[in-house]
Amino acid sequence: MIAVVIYALDLLTKTLVLRSLEGGPPLVIIPDLLQFRVIFNSGAAFSIGTGMTFVFTIVAAGVVIAILRTARKLRSLPWAITLGMLLGGALGNLTDRLLRYPAGFGRPAAGQLQGHVVDFIETFPGHFPVWNVADSMIVCGGILAVLLAWRGYQIDGTREVSGKNG
């Protein structure tokens, strides 16, 4: 359920921003802190790997498949939340890679699996990358996964406790 809500929120926000801001100046929400500005990112986070869109599309599809396979063993609410965040975010950006400019179905000349991710949230303009809802969920889900693993929480609901003496 979490993944569905995140995915829908990501698609909704991207659609609204594209309809209202694409091709226009940034919408300043809080000067020097937060603005909305549409960019099309062909790379990964922080625009790393620009031009490797095909690779990121394959990786995102692999992540989605891995999460869906892992979900069969899921018996932990914290891990369900974490995987829901990761899945919703991965699906949001994967949808962009499959369906958005310059690729997308019906545009074979541009090449399949070459779509650009819509990023629009810019914090500290000029000093920090532009991102979207899916990106934030992937980052937060990744942080939660590290914390859960560090604390010994397992996907099956058990908890591994490091060797403590009586």
Image (cartoon, rainbow, N blue to C red):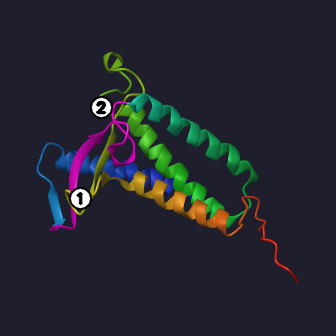
Q: Residue furthest left?
A: 25
Locate residue 106 relative to residue 32 in the image: left or right. Answer: right
Q: Which residue is mark 2?
A: 101
Q: CA distance from mark 2 to mark 1?
A: 26 Å
Locate residue 127 relative to residue 52 in the image: left or right. Answer: left
Q: Which residue is mark 1?
A: 127
Q: Secondary structure at mark 1?
A: loop
Magenta region, residue range: 30-51
Residue 13 location (% of width, % of height)? 32, 53
Q: Indicate the quadrant where residue 145 lies.
A: bottom right
Q: Residue furthest right?
A: 166
120 or 105, which is in the foreground? 120
Quadrant of the frame with the N terminus: bottom right
Q: Secondary structure at mark 2?
A: loop
Quadrant of the frame with the C terminus: bottom right
Q: Residues within 10 Å of mark 1 (few under 14, many from 20)?
A: few
State yes or no: residue 33 in magenta: yes
Q: Residue at x 36, y 32 (%)?
A: 115
Q: Residue at x 45, y 35 (%)?
A: 56
Locate residue 104 relative to residue 159 in the image: left or right. Answer: left
Locate residue 76 relative to residue 96 in the image: left or right. Answer: right
Residue 98 location (% of width, % of height)? 42, 32
Q: Is residue 55 above or below residue 31?
A: above
Q: Indicate the quadrant where residue 111 lies.
A: top left
Residue 96 location (% of width, % of height)? 38, 38
